[in-house]
Amino acid sequence: MPLELARRLVGKDRTVAANRSLGRLLAFVAGAINAGGFLAVQQYTSHVTGMLSALADNLALGQLALVFDGLVAVLSFLSGAMACAVLVNYARRRRLSSEYALPLLAEALLILCFGLLGSQLTQFEALLVPFTVILLCFIMGLQNAVVTKLSNAVIRTTHMTGIVTDLGIELGKLLYVNDRRVEMAPVRADRDRLAVLASLLLSFVMGGVVGAFGFKWVGYAFTVPIALLLATFALVPFWDDLRR
């Protein structure tokens, strides 16, 4: 049963239910890594909109060093998404079962690197901050791209702006009082979509709480169980390919 669960969640044959379940898992991971990463270097790494806004502000203020830092962060996120596309297309053209497992396995290894190397770099702040920002932005770009590809851009997990916007739209529809005298189709909320959006938001928040308290209590080691959780699911399709 655990093997079949892993194949269902991250295998190449996708279903709506599997996409939603994996989306919740990855939203939890994103929330944990984003919150823990902030406590490590006082910078969020999944919010490209904020990075670009800060880049523009720093450019106007003449803070060229911060402009360069912001540019590197955005390019790292972009590189993560590019790496995901390369891995997925490589596996797809070879008809591998690990089409989506490969980028998730890479993400698990990178999260483990963050946990193991971050604690070693705490005494070298000049290396810790750029290393952490580049690595976590790359991870977020990689993760956002893989869930975007497998769900055909229906689900996003690393930032909640779109999720909260869509949630607000559906709630507005839910609260809308239809006037029966108007000869138009009544406004109806998509309750199924509403539940999915709420669950993604809740998963991200729960992940953030776990990541923040985990980093506060045990430091960088809080990433180890997260990396192992991702790797456990991703290794099953990868192992299927190796056996063939």
Image: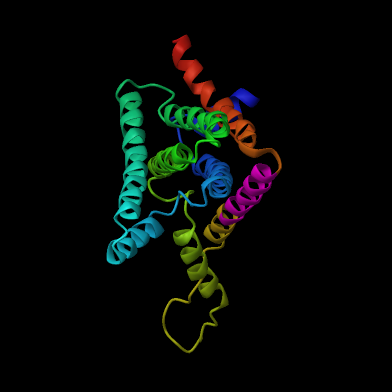
Residue 168 at what x, y percent from top left? Answer: 51, 69
Residue ID at (56%, 45%): 40
Residue ID at (49%, 57%): 160
Q: Which residues are magenta?
A: 201-216
Residue 211 at what x, y percent from top left? Answer: 62, 45
Horizontal side, residue 42 vs residue 137: left or right:
right
Give yes or no for residue 202 being in the magenta stretch: yes
Q: Is residue 66 above or below residue 132?
A: below
Coloration mode: rainbow
Residue 151 at what x, y percent from top left? Answer: 42, 44
Horizontal side, residue 171 vs residue 212: left or right:
left
Name the quarter where the C terminus is drawn: top left
Residue ID at (44%, 60%): 162
Residue furthest top as drawn? 243
Residue ID at (45%, 28%): 106
Horizontal side, residue 160 vs residue 70: left or right:
right
Residue furthest right as drawn? 217
Horizontal side, residue 138 vs residue 172: left or right:
left
Considering the whole magenta stretch, tell me its main secondary structure: helix
Give yes or no for residue 165 being in the magenta stretch: no
Q: Is residue 108 above or below residue 206?
A: above
Q: Is residue 96 above or below residue 137?
A: above
Q: Nearer the viewer, residue 64 or 132?
A: 64
Residue 225 at what x, y percent from top left? Answer: 64, 32
Name the quarter where the N terminus is drawn: top right
Q: How many marks?
A: 0
